[in-house]
């Protein structure tokens, strides 16, 4: 799976998201206004969605392409469709 994605980029993004989540947790303890917390939650959610897009893009460009060229195209497309469905449920 590491072949189909830029792992360093994904790790960097995920570490940033973990920092955002820790900051949100701290905001709750500091009695920050709800609106400000919701803004930060939305930012973290958007960043996580972007990570998912990058994983899906890498999967399409590597795994799906390889499956179509060297394997069972129908099965590959069916599995990709399921992956897209799972990802689209996140939002």
Image (tube, grey):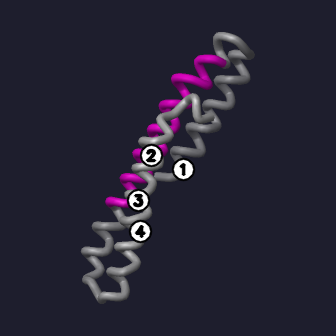
Circle 3: element type: helix
The residue that label 4 is drawn on is 21
The residue that label 3 is drawn on is 17
Relative side of 10 to 79, left or right: left
Q: Position of residue 5 (x, y in %)?
A: 51, 33
| Of the image marks 3 and 2, the number of the one nearer the N terminus | 3
> Which residue occupies the foreground of this view, 74 or 28?
28
Q: Position of residue 12 (x, y in %)?
A: 41, 49
**Are the residues tagged 3 and 1 within 8 Å (C-beta)?**
no
Disc 4 versus disc 1: distance between alpha carbons? 21 Å
The residue that label 2 is drawn on is 51
| Of the image marks 1 and 2, the number of the one nearer the N terminus | 2
The residue that label 1 is drawn on is 89
| Of the image marks 2 and 4, the number of the one nearer the N terminus | 4
Q: Does residue 76 lie above or below 9 as drawn?
A: above
Few, some or many residues within 10 Å of mark 1 (<14, 14–19, 20+): few
**Are the residues tagged 3 and 2 within 8 Å (C-beta)?**
yes
Point out the frontmost of discs 4 and 1: 4
> Which residue occupies the foreground of this view, 51 or 91?
51
Magenta segment range? 43-66
């Amino acid at each position: 799976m590491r072949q189909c994605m830029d792992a360093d980029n994904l790790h960097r993004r995920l570490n940033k998201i973990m920092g955002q989540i820790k900051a949100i947790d701290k905001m709750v303890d500091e009695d920050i206004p709800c609106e400000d917390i919701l803004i930060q939650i939305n930012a973290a959610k958007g960043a996580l969605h972007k990570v998912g897009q990058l994983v899906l893009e890498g999967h399409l460009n590597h795994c799906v392409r390889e499956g179509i060229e060297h394997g069972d195209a129908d099965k590959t497309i069916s599995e990709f469709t399921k992956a897209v469905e799972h990802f689209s449920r996140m939002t």
